[in-house]
Image: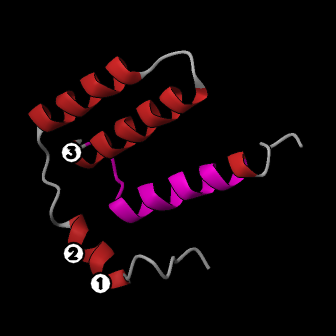
Amino acid sequence: AGVDPVVPESAAAAAADEFAADEDVREFLRTIADDVRGESEESKQLSAILYRVSDLYDPDEATSPEEIYLNVRHIMRIKSQGGLRR
């Protein structure tokens, strides 16, 4: 429950150690997120994903690539089913 067979635990654990706090990377990703955000749902979703990825480089955020992947996958499933209010 909650574990995705696509992302093995060993990969998720290793990835957690690879993302040291880096203000330059974090700000770069957030700038791109702001640039791509537009009026369409797709651009808003891409912006949100980039912003979440930038959290990997934020020392005040506790997230992992696996958590981001699972969150994005969940959002895409809801979207493909017609949203929360079907």
N-terminal of the two: label 2 or label 3? 2
Secondary structure that dominates the magenta span:
helix
Q: Secondary structure at mark 3?
A: helix
The structure residue drawn at horizontal position 28% and vertical position 26%, both measured from the top left corner, is: 32
Q: Position of residue 27 (x, y in %)?
A: 19, 28
In magenta, the rendered stretch is 60-78
The structure residue drawn at horizontal position 37% and vertical position 82%, both measured from the top left corner, is: 9
Labelled disc at residue 57: 3
**Where on the picture, by quarter, is residue 22?**
top left
N-terminal of the two: label 3 or label 1? 1
Query: How far apart in space, not on screen, are marks 1 and 2 (Cα)?
Result: 6 Å
Task: Tell me, yes or no, whether the highlighted magenta stretch contains residue 75.
Answer: yes
Q: Nearer the viewer, residue 72 or 56?
A: 72
Task: Identify residue type, mark 3.
Answer: Tyr
Label 1: few (<14), some or many (≥20) within 10 Å? few
Task: Identify residue type, mark 1.
Answer: Ser
Instruction: Tell me how the rendering is colored.
Output: secondary structure
Is the C-beta separation of discs 1 and 2 under 8 Å?
yes
Q: Position of residue 47 (x, y in %)?
A: 42, 30
| Rendered view: 53 above or below 40 | below
| Rendered view: 64 above or below 29 | below
The structure residue drawn at horizontal position 15% and vertical position 63%, both measured from the top left corner, is: 18
Q: Is residue 30 left or right of residue 20?
A: right
Q: Is residue 75 left or right of residue 20?
A: right
Query: How far apart in space, not on screen, are marks 2 and 3 (Cα)?
Result: 15 Å
Q: Secondary structure at mark 1?
A: helix
Q: Which residue is mark 2?
A: 14
Q: Secondary structure at mark 2?
A: helix
Labelled disc at residue 10: 1
Q: Nearer the viewer, residue 43 or 8?
A: 43
